[in-house]
Amino acid sequence: MTGPGSVAPDPASAIEELRARIAYHNERYFVLDAPEIPDAEYDALLRSLRALEAEHPELVSPGTPTGVVGARPSGQFAPVVHRVPMMSLDNAFTPAELGSWADRLAKLVSGDTAFECELKIDGLAVSLTYERGRLVRAATRGDGRIGEDVTANVATIAAIPGRLAAMVGEPPELIEVRGEVFMPVSAFAELNERQRELGGRPFVNPRNSAAGSLRQKDPSVTAGRALSFWAYQVGELVPSARSHAAKASGGDVEPVDSAATQEETLAWLERAGLPVNPERRVVTGLDQVLAFCRQAEQRRHQLDYDIDGVVIKVDDFALQRRLGSTSRAPRWAMAYKFPPEERTTLLHDIQVSIGRTGKATPFAVLEPVFVGGSTVSLATLHNEDQVRLKDVRPGDTVVVRKAGDVIPEVVGPVVPHSSGPRRRRRWRFPTRCPSCSAPLLRLPGESDTFCTNLDCPVQRVQRIAHFASRPAMDIEGLGEQRVALFVERGLLLDVADLFAFTAETFTGLAGFQSRSIDNLLGAIDSARHRPLHRLLTGLGIRHLGEVGSRALASALGDLEAIMAADEERLASIEGVGPVIGSSVTRWFASEVNRSVIDRLVSAGLDTVEAGHDADGPGGSVAPTLAGMSVVVSGTLQGYTREEAEAAVTSRGGRSPGSVSRRTDALVVGDAPGASKVQKAEELEVPIIDEAAFVALLATGTLPGRPVGTRPTVHRSGHAGR
DNA sequence: CGACCTCGAGTTCC
DNA sequence: CTCGAGGTCG
């Protein structure tokens, strides 16, 4: 296949190349059910071709893919001819494109047009034929004219009635209902969980697993897959003879052919017992259409099914008929597609990085790809088991997305068809540290692999950088880069060396002006007077982070007491258990570590937990939030995230990093984390803005909430003094 | 002992 | 943000 970036010089060969690529992807998508590129990219190819053909009509040939919807079905199932073709829709990718469509319509019809806005379900289009109310056939869309008979599989889908509901009057002689078969996101998660337990390969996304499930040879497999369905259209329709007669005599009937609008049709389908997505609205004007699209995009992750856009249809059937269709798509409908969140790219390699603890983390080296607002070239794979689970291999085309719209994530491989290129063999975890070549060790029962060489240069750099980091000793101007430089020059072997630094240390070092030397020395000096918990955090004792360090420091007060305490004493501290207890005693038992401590003390470091640093100079604050748990998400105006959390803890509250049943409020600023908001909505945790947060800090009460509706606010002792 | 809540560690990009 | 695992509580 030709590279995606290549451009042919003249229009004739450009058109030819585009046709070849589209034909290739048609085959991948329709026949092999293993697309290599997301729909948006495919659509872009199709649009480039259409544009070129419009510019050079003399080059348009009868076989061009812009004239048909897709490739032929694979022939595993019996072919079904759609007497009314299942057309695809034109796509709009921006509000502007939607606007120009609306403008074109406005020229053809006068007055305000009513539009039905529906969610565009990311599943498989299916046609269901009911004869006298009974389901007789189900077919895939195929190329739009000929699909495949999947009646046996569709019959196992619980949401699809085998018989239409009894209604006033007789059911139509024949009605072809069109809609989307999909797999709910929750069912998809369960399926993959099961798949994992069985040692099978997990599915990449709900759409693919729905497609795979529907194309099973054995319907009992489909039955176990929790598929669902939403109807959105009527294709072929033959009314019952009786309804015709009744209509003629003005009788009391409710035939679908009396529907004059899309909304009336959907309402009829609902009454007939077919599932119709309730997230729809009839609106007038472009502004309202765009508002619906915006809301849909914001809410898409709260739905239990994947959507990839919004379908906008002219509601009035008479108007639809006047607008008509092109050979490929109706002029009265448009699909507004959300920006793609998933992209495919080439996985060049899998490498491992070494952290300060020696943990070896595998990560994917990707052909850079633009996804979710930034170009991604690396993505973590967490650990050996995760790589195995996803079964990604160097050389694979993989699906990449943004987890929570921030962190790149490799979803899984696009597995080539058996007739396609052979995959390389399964990736093996390296046996030696990429930094120091020491053997890597994975203990039985653990998921992580470690480099156990304490002198490993990467580990040394990271350990010292961690000591200087913000949650630890907070030495400004001492990041990983500079630490690496000092370590490389042999100036820095452990954290105690920092406090022996003088201006002379920097002689001969490039990149240091006298100004920055002074700043760094000053920052190191002020680090001598950090509270004990910061020092503990900085030591990098396994399992002991910021919270654990605070617990130890506030329970025991000074370093000597901690070093003197045995495992049992440590484990008796709230928040500390046997694992942390033994990890701490083991750390201080080490000769090497004790000597570092000795030198730190000689260098004049404070080793006591003085007054809490969150308290201002005016003394302690009233404990208005005693016993409460307040989570912060997003960017606030008046506080950094740390300040906001400190404001909560200094008032006696807790501010953990995630929302749970025990959370009393979620404070949201600008761009809050979607998962936190979703969790809070699920658990009915109050969501408050910054103003309400300020009030909460002062009073300890939530605004606009009657007293007693949420009796989880406990107070201990008296507030203020 | 299991369910649930937290914590620690590593992570991406601008 | 995700994963894995420690700690707590019923």
Image: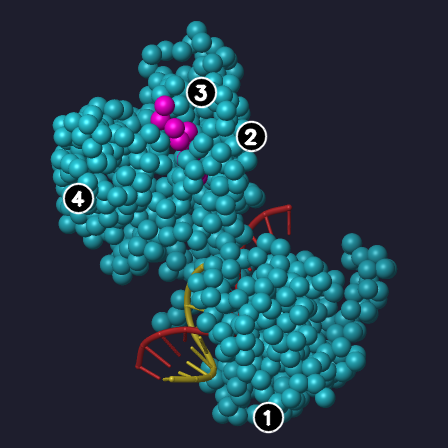
Chain colours: A cyan, B red, C yellow
Spot occupied by residue A569 in the image (x, y as percentages of width and height):
53, 92
Question: In this figure, which residue is indicated by the disc labeled 2?
Answer: A96
Q: Is residue A553 magenta?
A: no
Amino acid tagged 3: Leu
Spot occupied by residue A151 in the image (x, y as percentages of width and height):
16, 39
Residue A49: assigned label? 3
The numbered mark, 1 or 3, whose residue comes first in the sequence reads 3
Mark 3, other Cα within 10 Å: few <14 / some 14–19 / many ≥20: many
Label 4, label 1: how far apart the Cα atoms are: 81 Å
Label 3, label 2: how far apart the Cα atoms are: 21 Å
Residue at mark 4 shares a chain with residue at mark 2: yes
Q: Nearer the viewer, mark 4 or mark 1?
A: 4
Q: Nearer the viewer, mark 1 or mark 2?
A: 2
The numbered mark, 3 or 2, whose residue comes first in the sequence reads 3
Residue at mark 4 shares a chain with residue at mark 3: yes
- On-image quarter of the C terminus of chain A: bottom right
Q: Which image quadrant is residue C4 in?
A: bottom left
The residue at 23%/45% (across/down) is A273
Amino acid tagged 1: Ala
Q: Nearer the viewer, mark 4 or mark 3?
A: 4
Magenta range is A309-318
Identify the element where label 4 is drawn.
loop
Label 4, label 2: how far apart the Cα atoms are: 45 Å
Question: In this figure, which residue is indicated by the disc labeled 1?
Answer: A564
The residue at 27%/35% (across/down) is A178
Identify the element where label 1 is drawn.
helix
The residue at 49%/34% (across/down) is A284
Amino acid tagged 2: Ala
